[in-house]
Structure formats: structure tokens, C-alpha cells
Image: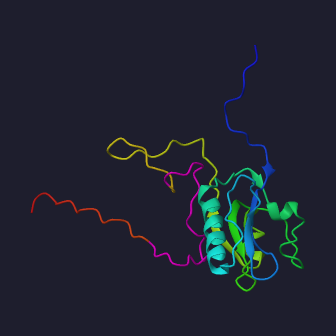
Amino acid sequence: MTTANSESSTERVPGRAWTVRLIGHGGRAASVTCSTAACRMPNRSEDLTALRTFAAAHAAAHAKAATINPHAYCHCGSQRCGAHPGTKTSCAGAVVMILRHDPIVRRVWSLEEVCAMCAPLIPNATLLARAVRPNRTTTPPIKSDGQVPSPARPGIAGGFSSAPAEGDPAPGRTPRRAPERPRRRRSGR
């Protein structure tokens, strides 16, 4: 009798990438395509503003739904680091999710799992999330009410943090402060 290993695999897998494109069709008509074949796209339209808005929202939806695989190897490295020509580096560090979008061209949105060494070298890239390797040697802390704390992003499996890396700006976000604890009264007063 053989048994299957129920633990998650630590084997390295290719970093994934999703690409959303705005494609012109002569004249003023355009359409949106996605590298994921199952995605439904709007029909051709002459309303480029609406199509750009849809494409950006579609890329954001992929980013929100994606679970970063901490065992992935760099997608940029698998493409021979063509995203940052002229800058040599060795792929290393934690896996991160980036969004590449050139604000001048405004036609392509790419989400990619890349290494922490390549991410800052890629032009027009925004760091969206970092993979967090599960630590199997420690148990999660338990709150005083007996419950285990929820993951960094509720509703999304995989346990990755959407917080930007130190020094990375997070446009449109204000940091949250932890709620203050009530102070205990000292006895004897």
C-alpha cells in the first residue's frame, strides 16, 4: 500500500505571470485581452477610457485573487532577466508580486512573481505583496479569547502580506495604528 505525502511541496515551480493588454484595431476601436483564457473581456469599443479602466481593474482583480507561491522561482529570471537589461544580478530573496505598467504607453499591465533582487531593477514596477514562508516549527499565537489570529489578507489563502516593503510607497494608503489598550489600574491607590 502506498500513501501520498500530505505536506505541501517544497519543490521550486516557475513564477507565474498574467498580462492584460489594450489592443487597437485600426481607426478608433480597441479591445482588451488577458493571458488567462478563462477571463471574459468586453467587446471592441471606441471608448478607450472605459477600456483602460476595465484593464486596470482586471489586473487588480488578478492581483487580489492570486496566492503567491513562496516556492516559486523568479519569472524575470526564467526570461533571462529581459525586464531589466543592462543590469546584472543573481536571482535571490523572497518571492514578491509586482505590477508592471508604463504610465506613458498605458496599454499593458503585467503581474509577475519575481525575486526580491529583480523587483527593484524592473522599470515601472510596483511591489504589491511578499510571499511569507510558513514556519512549521512554531505554532501560531493564540489570543486571550482562545482564537487563532486571521491571516494578513482575510479571504485570500496563502498567507501573504499585502504590506509594502520597507521604503516602498503605497499610493493611496495610510498606515493604520493599532488600537490602544485600556490601562490597568494599579492597586494601592
Using residue 85 as the reference point, say whether residue 66 is left or right of it. Answer: left
User: In the figure, 142 relative to 21: above or below?
Assistant: above
**In this orientation, which residue lies closer to the viewer: 154 or 118?**
154
Residue found at the very far top of the displayed protein: 1
Say which quarter of the image contains residue 36: bottom right
Placement of the C terminus among the 4 image quadrants: bottom left
- 175 and 55: which is toward the camera: 55
Quarter location, residue 75: bottom right
Q: What x and y, as percent, mark residue 8?
A: 68, 38
Q: Does residue 19 appear in this view?
A: no
Q: Which residues are magenta?
A: 154-175
Q: Position of residue 77 (x, y in %)?
A: 85, 63
* Residue sitting at x 76%, y 18%: 2
Which secondary structure class fits the magenta region best?
loop
In this picture, is 59 found above or below 40? Answer: below
Looking at the image, which residue is at 83% across and 72% down?
83
Can you give x and y, in whole percent of width and height, for residue 183 in the image? 23, 63
In the image shown, does 19 or 55 lie closer to the viewer?
Answer: 55
Is residue 43 covered in magenta? no
Query: Quadrant of the rendered structure where residue 41 is?
Result: bottom right
Left or right of residue 117: residue 82: right
Q: Residue at x 77, y 60 (%)?
A: 35
Residue 16 vs residue 172: left or right? Answer: right
Q: Residue furthest bottom?
A: 104
In this view of the protein, can residue 65 be seen by the observer?
yes
Question: Residue 91: where, in percent of width, then height?
Answer: 82, 63
Specify the quadrant that holds the N terminus: top right
